[in-house]
Each structure stands twice: as C-alpha cells, then as structure tokens.
Amino acid sequence: MPKALCMSGMAVAILIAMLFIADLAVPEQMAPFRKASVLMDIAMIVCAVMLFVASWFTFREQV
C-alpha cells in the first residue's frame, strides 16, 4: 500500500505541474486559469516538483 501511495503522489505531482505549465505556455484564451497570476503558476509548479521529489525519495526507500 505505501508504494501505491508514493506512485499516486508522483502522478498527482505530474498532473499539477502539467496543468500549471500549460497555464504559462499556451495563449491566454486557451489557458486553464486564463493566466490569472504568473506568480501562483510558478509557486504551484515548485510545489509539484517538491511533492514529486518527496514521493520519489519515499518510494526509493520502500524498495
């Protein structure tokens, strides 16, 4: 079960990062949040990376 939770954390981190990267990368008309706040996008990408790293280290510890 802990391995599945670590993999779920990594999957969620990837999805969150993709969502906020898309908000920064695509034109404003197609952006998920219409580029409401660039600072929020960057902060959420950093948080997603931190979640991924924490999940990865925990997964490696489980093996």
Image (cartoon, rainbow, N blue to C red):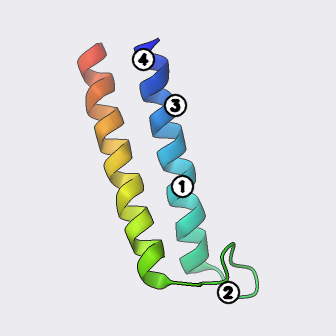
Cα distance in 3D space between marks 4 and 3: 9 Å
- Residue behind mark 4: 3
- Amino acid under label 4? Lys
Pair 2/4: label in front? 4
Marks 2 and 4, how far apart at CA: 38 Å
> What residue did someone put label 1 on?
16
Comparing 16 with 26, the one in front is: 16
Q: Disc 2 marks which residue?
A: 27
Identify which residue is drawn at 42% across, 17% down: 3
Amino acid type at mark 1: Ile
Q: Which mark is residue 58?
A: none
Is 18 rendered above or below residue 55? below
Q: Marks 3 and 2, how far apart in space?
A: 30 Å
Quadrant of the rendering where the C terminus is positioned: top left
Percent position (x, y) of residue 35? 60, 84
Residue at numbered disc 3: 8
N-terminal-most mark, 1 or 4: 4
* Left or right of 21 on screen, residue 61: left
What's the distance in space between the residues labelled 1 and 4, CA to CA?
20 Å
Residue occupying image coordinates x 29% and y 15%: 62
Check whether the beta carbons of the residues at disc 4 and disc 3 lie within 8 A of each other.
no
- What is the total number of numbered labels drawn onto the structure image? 4
